[in-house]
Image: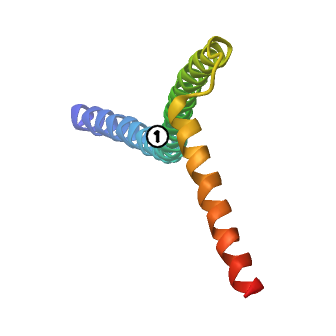
Amino acid sequence: MEETQRQYEQEQSNLADARKQLSESLDQMELDRGERERLQAERTTLTEQLTQQREASREASDALMRGELQNQNLDSQVTTLKEGIGRMESQLRELESRRLNSRAPCPRAMTRTRRARRDWLSYWSSEWSQRAS
């Protein structure tokens, strides 16, 4: 009986140890659950921040691309304007050279001018003749 008593006490001791271990494990599980919830909330927050940062990065990239395209467009316009100004300057030099080199008026221009003057005189002569009559 003594042996049975000793076994019973041993079993009671083992049972108490197991209950203590179970209680500690349940307490640890509760702590772990709280930590898991905190980590999940942190992960959610970080995921939202990451999404916002990616969106901000994409918007900044788009703005940079628009700026670069606008810069290229303006550079192209400046180049076109410079080329146009260069052509106009060349044409101006050519016209000034022609003006300085031409000593007599162009014969065609003279013919047109004389013809116009003759037509004008003829018209007014006939007008005055009709009014005088």
Residue nearest the observer in this picture, 26 or 112: 112
User: Residue 88 location in percent, x, y?
Assistant: 59, 24
Q: Can residue 38 be seen from the camera position used here?
A: no
The residue furthest front is 133
User: Residue 60 location in percent, x, y?
Assistant: 56, 35
Q: Taking 126 as reference, is 44 left or right?
A: left
Q: Please name the residue shown 58% across and 16% down the image.
A: 94
Kindly indicate the quadrant of the structure image that contains residue 74. Answer: top right
* The N terminus, quarter of image: top left
Graded by Cα atoms within 10 Å as few (under 14), some (14 to 19) or many (20 or more), the crowding at tag 1 reads: few
Q: Please name the residue shown 62% across and 27% down the image.
A: 105
User: Residue 117 location in percent, x, y?
Assistant: 65, 53
* The C terminus, quarter of image: bottom right
The residue furthest right is 132
Residue nearest the observer in this picture, 81 or 96: 96
Name the amino acid type tagged 1.
Answer: Asp
Kindly indicate the quadrant of the structure image that contains residue 89. Answer: top right
Q: Taking 132 as reference, is 114 left or right?
A: left
Residue nearest the observer in this picture, 118 or 55: 118
How many marks the image carries: the answer is 1
Q: Please name the residue shown 35% across and 38% down the image.
A: 18
Image height check: is 99 above or below 70?
above
Q: Please name the residue shown 34% across and 36% down the image.
A: 9
Say what secondary structure mark 1 lies in.
helix
Which residue is under mark 1?
32
